[in-house]
Image (cartoon, rainbow, N blue to C red):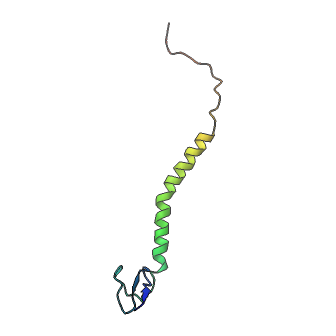
Amino acid sequence: MSLEPCNVCGVLNAEGTEICLSCGYPTTGNKRSAIFRWVAIALIICFALPFLSGLINWILLQLKPDPPSNQPKVSLIQK
């Protein structure tokens, strides 16, 4: 008896099994359609983009030196 990989999830199953014990799909079934992969990639980008843009802005602010102030210091205390 040999082992065959499931076409959906890749888990090794016995040669005579019709349904994968791991994912429940037929072992000779087609892989998931490409739309699932594209949706997963789009979701990862949507969640990672705000984090990455904030990180880039923080790095740019750390690299940019503070401009020297030429204005004289004025005290608000009245004498």
Rendering quarter of residue 26: bottom left
Q: Which residue lies furthest to the top in this view?
A: 79
Q: Give me the residue at 33% from left, 82% from top.
A: 21
Q: Position of residue 48 (x, y in %)?
A: 49, 58
Q: Which of 61 and 28 is in front in this view?
A: 28
Q: Is 2 located above or below residue 68 in the figure?
A: below
Q: Where is residue 25 in the image (x, y as percent from the top left)?
A: 36, 84
Q: Which of 15 and 68 is in front in this view?
A: 15
Q: Which of 35 and 15 is in front in this view?
A: 15
Q: Where is residue 65 in the image (x, y as percent from the top left)?
A: 64, 35
> Considering the image in quadrants, where does the N terminus appear?
bottom left
Q: Position of residue 11 (x, y in %)?
A: 41, 80
Q: Is 52 located above or below residue 44 in the figure?
A: above
Q: Is residue 21 left or right of residue 78?
A: left
Query: Tag count in the figure?
Result: 0
Q: Give me the residue at 62% from left, 33% from top.
A: 66
Q: Is 64 located above or below residue 71 in the figure?
A: below
Q: Is 79 located above or below residue 2 in the figure?
A: above
Q: Which of 40 and 27 is in front in this view?
A: 27
Q: Give me the residue at 43% from left, 87% from top.
A: 4
Q: In this view, does 22 lie to the left or right of 78?
A: left
Q: Give me the residue at 58% from left, 45% from top.
A: 59
